[in-house]
Amino acid sequence: MRNLVVDASVAGAWFLGETDPVAYRALVRLEEMGSVVPQLWHLEVRNSLLSAERRSRLPAAQMRGCLWVLNQLPIRTDNDVDLALAFDLARSHTLSFYDSVYLELAKRTDGELATLDRSLHMAAVTEGVSVMGDSSSN
């Protein structure tokens, strides 16, 4: 089975109580087989939790528990991003550079991408990357 590359939008759904079938499937698969993420993922997920706390979407009392769970997830961090490829992907698909890093990782490792971001999803399909929840790639 392919590596699972989870982006920050999916992780945000886990911690903020959003129900989404892709987020649920990604969590089940992550628990079974683990996942690989770029270093950026750790920064983005923690930033989204902090933003949610500041907007009162996540009670301060739950933050410590979220961070504990986050640290327990079977996730491997990939630090070998091909910056030139990520930049080219961002330019050719009008993605943020941050989003293109997830696409670069999935493409480089022949992984399956789990994202709730429509633009990233479409770019991945265009690049021939398997996307969780996409009937043409599963």
Image: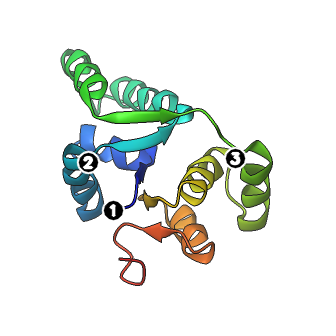
Q: Disc 3 designates what residue?
A: 97
Please rate how many residues cluster around mark 1, counting C-alpha atoms within 10 Å: few if below 14, some from 14 to 19, many from 20: few
From mark 3 to mark 1, how far is it between C-alphas? Answer: 27 Å
Q: Disc 1 designates what residue?
A: 1
Indicate left or right for 89 with 6 as reference.
right
Q: Disc 3 or disc 1, which is closer to the eye?
A: 1
Q: Secondary structure at mark 1?
A: loop
Residue 106 pos. (x, y %): 53, 56
Q: Is residue 16 visible?
A: no
Indicate left or right for 86 with 56 as reference.
right
Among all residues in the image, which is located at the extreme front? 1
Among the two numbered marks 3 and 1 on one chain, the one whose residue lies closer to the N terminus: 1
Q: Nearer the viewer, residue 88 or 45?
A: 88
Up/down of 137 relative to 5, above or below: below
Q: Nearer the viewer, residue 135 or 80?
A: 80
The type of colouring in the image is: rainbow
Pick the quarter of the image with the C terminus: bottom left
Residue located 34% across and 71% down the image = 133
From mark 2 to mark 1, how far is it between C-alphas? Answer: 9 Å
Please rate how many residues cluster around mark 3, counting C-alpha atoms within 10 Å: few if below 14, some from 14 to 19, many from 20: some
Q: Disc 2 designates what residue?
A: 33
Residue located 46% across and 29% down the image = 42
Q: Name the kind of residue labelled 1 in the image.
A: Met
Up/down of 132 relative to 76, above or below: below
Residue 116 pos. (x, y %): 41, 59
Q: Nearer the viewer, residue 99 or 53?
A: 99
Residue 128 pos. (x, y %): 57, 75
- Toward which corner of the image does residue 123 lie, by quadrant? bottom right
Residue located 26% across and 48% down the image = 33
Q: Name the kind of residue labelled 3 in the image.
A: Phe
